[in-house]
Amino acid sequence: MAEEAPESGDADVSDSMVREMVAELKPDWQVTSIERSPYGTDLVAILEVRTPEPQSVVLKATTADFVDPIIARSEPRLLELVHRETTIPVPAVFGYCDDHRHYPAPFYVMDYVEGANYENRLEELPRTARETLLREAGENLAELHELGPLPAPGKIGVQDGELCVLDTDDYPRHDDFHDAVLADCMETLDTLTAGGFYPDLADDPERFADLVPELREHVRERVPDLSEPEEPTYCHWDYRTGNLLIDPDTGETRAVLDWANLSSAEPAYNLGQTEFYLLNPVADGPRRTSRLRETFRTAYADARTDWEFTESVRERIDVYRLVCRLGAMGCLPLWYQDASPEERNERAAEHRSVVNQHLAE
């Protein structure tokens, strides 16, 4: 009899369960080795299988509480959609399971892709490789955004077995995108007065509390005055180096990962988020940052011939980039829980420096 599924975490998912999960999807495959990834919150295991030819694949299963199943079920379907309709490099999906009595679900098996992960190590990439990374990011997001438009802003999930923009009590659609952005900002700023989104992990719960009053006033003025957003489309809200497999010599992106938790939002929002993740104005300085941003934006605009960076689009991106930084400030206790105090202080100082630039504008 199969083992009971764990409530969360991958430590309770035995090797025998891993083999059984693969057998559910690919009965003729034989798992010959299992290597568990130490990264991420869910079970990710690199497997050697005979199909009958030897092949490396990845099993991913939702074993934590960070992503609801109704959202997580979208990931293999989105990978299939992107693989089929674009040239964005993503792993091929070999099969998936939405629900199961005995195993943590959803789970799926995808191709293994070689590449380096440069999470928090962007400065290690050679200069030309960094430019390649930004150029391809612009091209990839342009292709993704062309898959829209979608009916409304909201979260991408699965209902009745199909990808959709959810409209539930937990994940409502938004009638006014900027009202939703402002509400998210206010919620984030509320958390920053007492340790962020993860106060139990915060070594300094009032680290950003002094910034909150002025930030409240700033976003209350800026967000409602933004120009009308464009029609919503698929947005990879977590397009960062931690979710990219990169050729360390050339900077070529070999795979874009983490397609769970996608949003339906206007393209400029996704561009602002990505610029926040892939640019570091404090470390790179204004001139280098401007050059890298122009590389990213030029690639995006060239790939969408009927689209341009108007002044109103640039203004919205600037505000959205601040919104993303506020979220990162709220997540600092989680993202840097294993970092040294010096590393946390360094990142906090970076946040402060950029936020103060926004407030001075």
Image: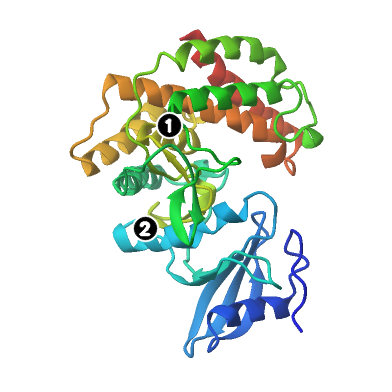
In the picture provided, is 222 more to the left or to the right than 99? left
Disc 1/disc 2 C-alpha distance (Å): 21 Å
What residue appears at the point 51 percent right and 41 percent down from the top-left corner?
Answer: 123
Q: Quadrant of residue 326?
A: top right
- Report helix, strand or loop for mark 1: helix
Residue lying farthest left?
A: 305
- Mark 2 packing: few (<14 Cα in 10 Å), some, or many (20+)? many
In the picture provided, is 4 more to the left or to the right than 237? right
In the picture provided, is 302 more to the left or to the right than 48? left
- Report helix, strand or loop for mark 2: helix
What residue appears at the point 59 percent right and 71 percent down from the top-left corner?
Answer: 46
* Three-letter amino acid code at the position of disc 2: Val
* Three-letter amino acid code at the position of disc 1: Gly
Point out residue 248 in the picture as x, y percentages from the top left corner: 45, 55
Q: Quadrant of residue 189?
A: top right
Q: How is the image coloured?
A: rainbow
Along the viewing direction, whichever of 85 and 100 lies nearer the viewer: 100
The label nearer to you, 1 versus 2, is: 2
Query: Residue beneath label 2, please?
Result: 82
The quadrant of the image that shows the C terminus is top left
What residue appears at the point 66 percent right and 58 percent down from the top-left corner?
Answer: 42
Query: Residue beneath label 1, please?
Result: 272
| In the image, residue 161 above or below residue 344 | below
